[in-house]
Every structure is written in C-alpha cells, then in structure tokens.
Image (spheres, rainbow, N blue to C red):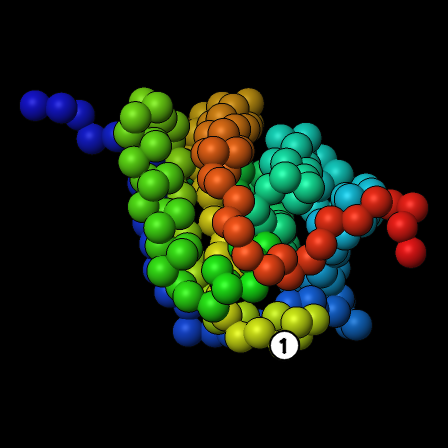
C-alpha cells in the first residue's frame, strides 16, 4: 500500500471580489497585514525592486519575475511571505496571486480550474513530496483598466511546522520552484492581452 504524500493541493472559490488594479492602504494598523498596492510588473518590470514582500525572499522574487516576463501568459496581482515560529516549530507561509494576461481567459473561472487540474497532475508526475499545503483560491475580480469582469487566482503556500527554520525554508523554496516550472509550460493563448508588455523606455 502506497504512503500518503506529504503535501496537499486544494482548490476553492472565494465569496469575495476585488478590483485590479488596487490602491495601497492609506492607514496602516498595528499587527495588521499591510497592503502596499498593485504593482504592474508586466508593463514596468523594474517595479519589482519596490515590493517590500520580496525583499527577504529570493525564491518568491524569482517566481514573480518569471510570471511577469514578456513571454508569460500571466501577470502577478499580489504576494506575501513570512517565517513563523510557534510552540509547534517553524513554518513559512504566504501566497502568490496571479491573473491570466488574456481578456477572454479571465472571464471564465474554468480556465483557472484547468491550471489547477494540470498542476495537480504535474505534482504526481514530478514526484513532488514536500511537507506543504497548497491551496488555490479563485476570486471574482473587476479589471478596471479594460472594463472586464472576471477572475483572478491566489495560490496559498504553507509548510508544516518543522523543527528548524532551514527545513521550513527548504520546503518553501522547493514548492516555489515547482510552481515556476509548471507555469513555464503553459502556452500563451492567441487573444487580446490585458497588459501589453512594453520597453522600460517606451512612453
């Protein structure tokens, strides 16, 4: 009898909706998660250096950069990463929210389900077996720049409580690499782009 994998990979639908782009919080409350606002890395990749959530996470920064590259079918909406210590041990958790960079793709949630489905198969084929919980959450979104109502998706990643921060970091980074490798295989659809990648020097 085969052993159960160390990871879990789930999909759910959020009851909430959001606007993209979105502004940063004007007032920052103590002990609250900070919203620094949407950064359009598809149009201006250099803005990645202004994202505080990526300052201490080389792996997440590399993944965000890859998803926003010119050839990618997606753009990032938000992200976070933190190392948490408790009585149970050490855990790294966070999320990466992304959207299809395709005006027609974002309007049907089934396109995100297809991504999740094939990613789940990829985990099995690649023999991925890290102690992490992956949870995909599809959410309604209003893309105000192009006046389209559709959906975005966030992949939440949380390692199990492990005995050292190094173990938690390793499981986290290997999970990010698995996600990066999968997204690199997704073909770009022939459709109207939401954001047309531009040269930094273009006006």
Number of residues whose C-alpha sits closer than 10 Å to that of mark 1, classed few (under 14), some (14–19) or many (20 or more): few
Q: Is residue 132 above or below residue 113?
A: above
Q: How many marks?
A: 1
Q: Residue at x 34, y 41 (%)?
A: 118
Q: Position of residue 72 (x, y in %)?
A: 60, 42
Expressed as whole percent of the image width and height from the top left, the position of residue 148 reads: 57, 74
Compared to residue 53, the image places residue 166 above or below, namely above
In which quadrant is the N terminus drawn? top left
188 sits to left or right of 56: left
Residue 111 versus residue 134: which sits nearer the camera? 111
Q: On the image, which quarter does residue 191 sit in?
A: bottom right
x, y percent for residue 132 = 40, 36
Q: Circle 1 is placed at which residue position? A: 147
In the foreground, 77 or 149: 149
Q: Residue at x 84, y 45 (%)?
A: 199
> Which residue sits at x=74%, y=69%?
23
- Indicate the secondary structure of the residue bearing disc 1: loop
Q: Position of residue 17 (x, y in %)?
A: 51, 74
> Can you see residue 15?
yes
- Would residue 89 be visible to someone looking at this image? no
Q: Residue at x 50, y 49 (%)?
A: 189
Q: Residue furthest front?
A: 190
For residue 34, side relative to residue 142 (left or right): right
Please say if 144 is above or below 59: below
């Amino acid at each position: 009898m085969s052993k159960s994998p160390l990871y879990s990979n789930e999909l759910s639908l959020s009851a909430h909706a959001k606007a993209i782009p979105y502004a940063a919080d004007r007032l920052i409350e103590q002990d609250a998660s900070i919203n620094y606002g949407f950064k359009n890395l598809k149009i201006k990749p250099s803005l990645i250096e202004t994202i505080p959530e990526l300052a201490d996470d080389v792996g997440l920064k590399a993944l965000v950069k890859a998803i926003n590259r010119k050839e990618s079918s997606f753009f990032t909406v938000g992200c976070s990463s933190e190392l948490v210590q408790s009585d149970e041990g050490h855990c790294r958790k966070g999320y990466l929210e992304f959207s299809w960079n395709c005006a027609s793709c974002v309007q049907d949630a089934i396109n995100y389900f297809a991504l999740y489905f094939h990613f789940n198969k990829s985990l099995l084929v690649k023999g991925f077996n890290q102690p992490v919980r992956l949870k995909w959450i599809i959410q309604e979104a209003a893309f105000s720049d192009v006046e389209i109502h559709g959906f975005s998706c966030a992949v939440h990643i949380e390692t199990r409580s492990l005995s050292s921060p190094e173990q938690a970091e390793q499981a986290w980074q290997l999970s990010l690499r698995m996600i990066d490798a999968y997204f690199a295989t997704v073909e770009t659809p022939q459709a109207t782009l939401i954001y047309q990648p531009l040269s930094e020097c273009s006006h």
